[in-house]
Image (spheres, grey):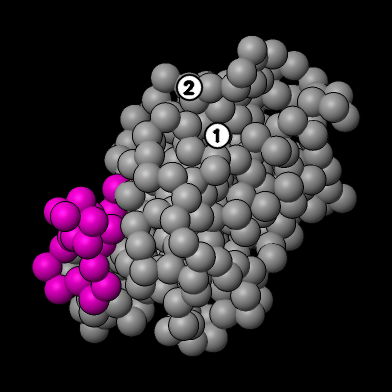
C-alpha cells in the first residue's frame, strides 16, 4: 500500500493528539501547543546554531522523566519561553503532570523563534506569552488552522511570510506519522524568485499548489544571528522509547534541509521534537527507518504548506506567497 495522508492531513491524524493556537495581532506573535490525551514519550534533536529551549535536557534517553504532557512552540525569542509557564498552570489545574512527592508537575518542553523585528508592537509592560500559552492550551483540538496562526503568526522566511504547517502519512502497516512546524528561517522555502517550493518532489496531490519544480536560485541572507528558526514536532502512534524518538528527530531534520535552502545555519535555531503516543505496534529497526523517513517527508510538506497558507495582515513586512502568486 502506498503511504497516503490521513483524513485531516495534519499531525492530529495521530490519534490522541490535539493542537491549539493563540496569537496577538498587535504583538504580531503567538504560541502553538501540542497536547496529548496522555503523557507522550518524547525525544529532541537540535541542528541550528542559535536555539532557544526549555526542558529539552529532560528528553535525553538517560534522563528520569518518562514523558511529556505538552510541547510548546512560541514566538517572542527568549520571552516566549514563558509561554510554557501558562501551559503548565493550565495542565496543573487539569491534574496533569509527573507524579513526585505527592505532587503533579507538568512537563512542558518549549522552543522559541525570533519574531521581535517583524513590525509588531513589542512595547508591553507584562510578558504576554504566559497568557498566550494558556489560551493555546484551551484551544487545543484535533482540527486547527495553518498559515498565519499561533507560533507562526509573525514568522517570516528570506523573502516571504512564514507560518504554521502540518502534514501526515498513513504507512499502511498500522502506523501513522505526522509533522507540525513553525517556519521562520533565514533561508527560502521557494526556488529563486518563483512560486515553486523546494519541497515539490514530496508533494502529495496539490496540497501546496501542485506547481512542480522551478528553477534554482538562492536569495541573500537578510536576517542576523539568532533572528531565525524552524521549530518542528514529528509524531507517530507507534510504540517508541526515548532513544528511538531521538533517532526519529534526527532523521526528520532531513525534511527541513529538503524544504528550506539554506537550513541549519549559524543564524537558525532549527529543532525537531519527536513524540509517540504508544497506541500502536512496537517498532522494529526496519519500521523505525520507515517512520524516520516518513517524518522527514511530512516535515518537508508541512513547511511548504505553512508558506502556502500564510495570510496577509496589515503592516506586514514581507509579502505572503498568496500576495505574490495566488493573485496572478
Decide whether residue 282 is among the magenta residues.
no
18 left or right of 225 in image: left
Which of the two residues, 12 or 206, is positioned nearer the viewer here? 206
> For residue 158, what is the image quadrant?
bottom left
Q: Residue at x 49, y 87 (%)?
A: 224
Q: Bounds of the magenta span?
A: 309-328
Q: Which mark is residue 6?
A: 2
Q: Tell me the crowding category of disc 2: few under 14, some 14 to 19, or many 20 or more residues within 10 angstroms, Cα based.
A: some
Query: Is 57 above or below relative to 94?
Result: below
Q: For mark 1, what is the residue?
A: 178
Residue 287 position within the rendered picture, expressed as x and y whole percent measured from the top left:
79, 26
Q: Residue at x 71, y 32 (%)?
A: 291
Inter-mark Cα distance, 1 to 2: 9 Å
- Say whether disc 1 or disc 2 marks the residue closer to the N-terminus: 2
Decide whether residue 312 is among the magenta residues.
yes
Residue 233 position within the rendered picture, expressed as x and y whole percent measured from the top left:
57, 46
Residue 265 position within the rendered picture, expressed as x and y whole percent measured from the top left:
62, 75
Give SS at disc 2: loop
Amino acid at each position: 500500500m502506498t503511504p497516503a495522508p490521513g483524513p485531516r492531513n495534519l499531525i492530529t491524524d495521530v490519534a490522541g493528539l490535539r493542537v491549539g493556537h493563540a496569537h496577538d495581532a498587535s504583538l504580531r506573535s503567538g504560541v502553538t501547543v501540542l497536547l496529548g490525551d496522555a503523557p507522550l514519550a518524547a525525544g529532541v534533536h537540535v541542528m541550528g546554531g542559535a536555539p532557544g529551549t526549555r526542558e529539552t535536557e529532560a528528553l535525553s534517553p538517560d534522563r528520569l522523566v518518562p514523558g511529556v504532557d505538552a510541547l510548546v512552540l512560541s514566538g517572542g525569542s527568549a520571552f516566549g519561553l514563558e509561554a510554557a509557564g501558562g501551559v503548565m498552570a493550565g495542565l496543573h489545574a487539569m491534574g496533569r503532570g509527573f507524579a513526585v512527592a505527592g505532587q503533579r508537575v507538568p512537563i512542558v518542553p518549549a522552543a522559541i523563534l525570533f519574531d521581535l523585528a517583524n513590525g509588531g508592537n513589542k512595547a508591553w509592560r507584562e510578558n504576554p506569552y504566559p497568557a498566550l500559552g494558556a489560551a493555546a492550551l484551551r484551544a487545543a483540538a484535533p482540527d486547527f488552522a495553518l498559515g498565519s496562526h499561533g507560533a507562526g503568526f509573525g514568522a517570516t522566511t528570506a523573502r516571504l511570510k512564514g507560518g504554521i504547517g502540518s502534514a501526515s502519512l498513513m504507512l499502511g502497516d498500522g502506523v501513522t506519522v505526522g509533522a507540525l512546524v513553525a517556519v521562520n528561517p533565514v533561508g527560502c522555502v521557494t526556488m529563486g524568485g518563483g512560486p515553486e517550493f523546494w519541497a515539490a518532489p514530496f508533494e502529495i496531490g496539490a496540497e501546496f499548489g501542485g506547481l512542480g519544480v522551478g528553477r534554482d536560485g538562492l536569495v541573500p541572507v537578510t536576517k542576523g544571528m539568532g533572528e531565525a528558526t524552524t521549530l518542528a514536532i514529528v509524531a507517530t502512534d507507534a510504540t517508541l522509547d526515548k532513544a528511538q524518538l531521538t533517532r526519529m528527530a534526527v532523521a526528520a531534520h532531513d525534511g527541513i534541509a529538503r524544504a528550506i535552502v539554506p537550513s541549519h545555519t549559524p543564524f537558525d535555531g532549527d529543532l525537531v521534537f519527536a513524540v509517540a503516543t504508544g497506541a500502536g505496534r512496537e517498532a522494529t529497526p526496519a519500521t523505525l527507518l520507515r517512520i524516520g523517513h516518513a517524518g522527514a517527508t511530512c516535515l518537508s510538506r508541512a513547511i511548504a504548506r505553512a508558506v502556502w497558507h500564510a495570510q496577509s495582515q496589515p503592516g506586514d513586512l514581507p509579502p505572503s506567497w498568496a500576495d505574490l502568486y495566488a493573485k496572478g
